[in-house]
Image (spheres, helix red, strand yellow):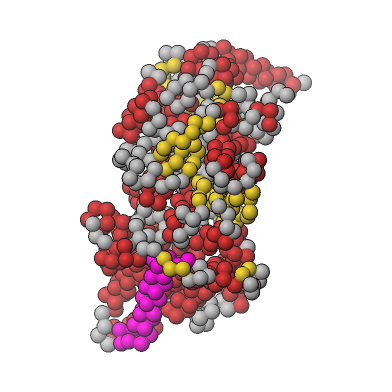
Amino acid sequence: MKRLVRVLGVLGTVLLAAAAWAGSGISDGVIRIGVLNDMSGTYSDLAGPGSVVAAKMAVEDFGGKVLGKPIEILSADHLNKPDVAANKAREWYDKDKVDAIVDLPTSSCALAVLEVAKQKNKITIVSTGASTRITNKNCSPTNVHWTYDTYALAVGTAKAIVAEGGDTWFFLTADYAFGHSLEKDTAEVVKASGGKVVGAVRHPFPSADFSSFLMQAQASKAKIIGLANAGADTTNAIKQAREFGITPNQTLAGLLVFLTDVHSLGLETAQGMQLTTGFYWDYNDETRAWSKRFNERHGRMPTMVQAGVYSSLMHYFKAVEKAGTDEATAVMKAMKAIPVNDMFAKNGWIRDDGRMVHDMYLVQVKSPSESKGEWDYYKVLRVIPGDEAFMPLEKSTCPLVKK
Amino acid sequence: MSEVFGIPIQAFLGQLLIGLINGSFYAILSLGLAVIFGLLNIINFTHGAQYMMGAFVAWMGLKYLGINYWAALLLSPLVVGLTGVVIERLCLRRLYQLDHLYGLLLTFGLALVVEGLFRQGYGISGLSYPVPKLLQGGENLGFMYLPIYRAWVVVASLVVCFGTWYVIERTKLGAYLRAGTENPRLLQAFGINVPVMVTLTYGFGVALAAFAGVLAAPIYQVNPVMGSNLVIVVFAVVVIGGMGSIFGSIVTGLGLGVVEGLTKVFYPEASAVVVFVIMALVLLVRPAGLFGREA
């Protein structure tokens, strides 16, 4: 009996506290944002410290305060390890009173943090993580998937290439979850567009030498070699394909290529390649103005995911202001109610499964003679409207979607 | 068309050649490790970082000073070899009396520091180093297209490997080195300055790693972690060949390159593991390695 009273007592206190918290605007007087990503490994150039720069720019551009309360940015390295990511997320939410965690590269890490945030009813905004699982099987009511996903990459690049006559494909696939998912999504698009997949080879992650795999791709006589990998694997494969005279006889399709990858390869090697991106710095006056400021601070032009971090935080701050609180459910409701209109996206909107729908761009890497200077790398071939770029909501397996 | 294990003989020949090319990198790196272990009894875990430094110094030379590939092929091993000399004088020298483990920990720690510094300065996505003009293009051999640069890599590393083997096994200088391995105190009594010899040997082993780095620069992206994945495989090569065996490390390096190359055709998923499976098998049957002498 005594025990029951005690349990009820504790329960009552917790409920009271929770109620008080939910009603009182900003918890603990500060809005805290955690940028959790890979600060030292494979993805540290394309996201890493640059994402923190983007987050700080968002805070400044918003005036440093929401509802009169200061905004703070924390950052940490998750080493691309899901357990490290989940532990850091727990620590941030519980001990440091972080309100939202953003960026989250490496799908496995993003999924782990999503679970933690779901339990604690806290916000996550994924910018760099790519897997479509984030808005399907593993979707969360307090998460938004901001910049892109493997489906959008596949649709953008594969559809365009098949339409131009590149109808036979061979895949070079990184042998882990991300590579498999990218290969599967792309193969489906290729087949649906009337193309044929003639083969695939799964290479260990990471690999340095691709000559053996490339010769298998060459022997397949496929018109298109799809690179279902990322980072150094992609750049090494592209470089060696050129060395072995595979390009330009066969065409490479980089399925996940970032601006920093093209920068590191150089235009001589990367020219002519088509790829899909959620943002390009040199698209219009707004993107140029923002990217120029970013470049002044970071010394590099922003990748799509770094721009995504900025855009997602601006939107988050607006939503907190509208909701009048930092309580996750209320903020998420506001995030879904306001359209996204900034330098990153026009008329973007957030669906029930957490997908932020916005236009994507099919681009082609310029040749050295077309490029007018450093970072002048892409020609935008086509703007892919959001509805076409992302997986239709009726196909989503997310339990939150009402059918 | 005739076939080998279900693949056309032409493709098979191509893959053999590719294996040999990658094997020549293994050979030259494991040779450096074997030389260092033979004389210093140090398991040089900085080897991967020194290979990376070789590539970076070549890149920096081109970018900042306009030094071309051929000059870099000489200069870069020299510069990186000198850093090796400094490391030996300042740090390694103090560890010879201690267990192998201390040398391993020190060199491993150094590798992490060096990689961290380069990552801080140059980021992770890598830098491009162009193939020198003379070696651009390729030759169609009928069964495969062979880039001239890759052919050069095989020739250059074979020359360096067998040159090193010849010096150590067939010359007077080599005899001193081998004597130093067996009994340094006796050699000293004959008037040879053994500590200087040890320093220079370490510098030479490091220079070999840097040489491999320069060879690799035009093929792979020059990247701060390019050595850390490779060094583990190279250690397995050394273990399979027999620690400290010069000839063993060369032959095993080439052989394992071929085995790995063929695995990439028949079962690509296992190509990262096959070297270690072989290592485990060799250790079970011949713990001293294929070419090692039983202790």
Question: Which quadrant of the figure contains the N terminus of chain B?
Answer: bottom right
B222 to A317, vertically: above or below = below
Front position in the image: B173 or A366: A366
Q: Which residues are magenta?
A: B145-174
**Farthest-out residue, right:** A1
Rendered image quadrant of residue A369: top left
Q: Residue at x 74, y 21 (%)?
A: A4
Rendered image quadrant of residue A150: top right
Front position in the image: B212 or A290: A290
| B169 in the magenta segment | yes
Front position in the image: A228 or A219: A219
Pinpoint residue A376: horizontal percent, then vertical percent: 35, 39
Q: Is residue A79 left or right of residue A377?
A: right
Q: Residue at x 31, y 69 (%)?
A: B203
Pinpoint residue A81: horizontal percent, then vertical percent: 54, 44
Q: Residue at x 44, y 80 (%)?
A: B247
Q: Residue at x 24, y 53 (%)?
A: B64
Pinpoint residue A29: horizontal percent, then vertical percent: 46, 17
Q: Tell me which secondary structure the magenta stretch mostly adopts.
A: helix
